[in-house]
Amino acid sequence: MTIYHIAFRADWVQAEAAGEYRVSTRGRTLEQQGFIHAATANQVDGVAGAFYADVDAAELVVLEIDPDRLTAPLRYEEVPGAADPFPHIYGPLNTDAVVGTSALPVGGKSDDG
């Protein structure tokens, strides 16, 4: 099952050059948060609406991640107020685990959710 992470396009470009991605969520690094936030296909739209509604969609990219290719541990954890657990990546996201990217359409609706 693919998991997803909404990233600023500039951060993703930098990560591709470095070989790893270290942003947890908007405004927080992996080091600050302790893990990288991710989402299932059904959770992407909610995350986009809650945290990125004020951002121009052209600045964002949805990373499509193959959990089997991750080099860091993946844990599904309960989040207060959420119906289902969210996937969290406990370490840097190795860029070769990202099997695709897609645009986040205007209005925060993704094709996946």
Image (cartoon, rainbow, N blue to C red):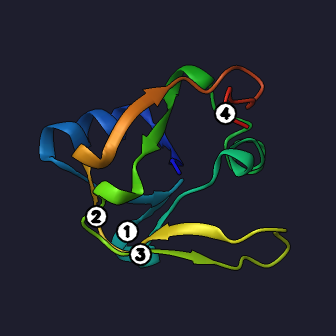
Give the label on residue 78, or none. none
Percent x, y for residue 27? Answer: 50, 57
Against 8, residue 79 (above or below) is below
Distance of label 4 from label 3 (alpha carbons): 29 Å
Could you say which is closer to the camera, residue 33 or residue 89?
Answer: 89
Is tag 4's residue or tag 3's residue first in the polypeptide sequence? 3
Distance of label 3 from label 1 (alpha carbons): 5 Å
Asked if the residue under mark 1 is in contact with the one under mark 3, i.e. CB atoms within 8 Å, the reply is yes
Distance of label 2 from label 1 (alpha carbons): 7 Å
Give the label on residue 92, or none. 2
Q: Residue at x 81, y 69 (%)?
A: 82
Could you say which is closer to the camera, residue 56 or residue 22?
Answer: 22
Is tag 1's residue or tag 4's residue first in the polypeptide sequence? 1
Percent x, y for residue 21? Answer: 29, 52
- Mark 1 residue element: helix
Q: Amino acid at mark 4?
A: Asp
Q: Identify the residue under disc 1.
A: 30
Q: Residue at x 35, y 58 (%)?
A: 68
Q: Amino acid at mark 2?
A: Pro
Q: Is residue 105 left or right of residue 21?
A: right
Distance of label 1 from label 4 (alpha carbons): 25 Å
- Mark 3 residue element: helix
Q: Identify the residue under disc 4.
A: 112
Distance of label 2 from label 4 (alpha carbons): 24 Å
Q: Identify the residue under disc 3.
A: 32
Percent x, y for residue 38? Answer: 54, 58
Camera-side mark, 3 or 2: 2
Is tag 2's residue or tag 4's residue first in the polypeptide sequence? 2
Q: Amino acid at mark 3?
A: Gln
Q: Residue at x 14, y 46 (%)?
A: 18
Is tag 3's residue or tag 2's residue first in the polypeptide sequence? 3
Q: Residue furthest left?
A: 18
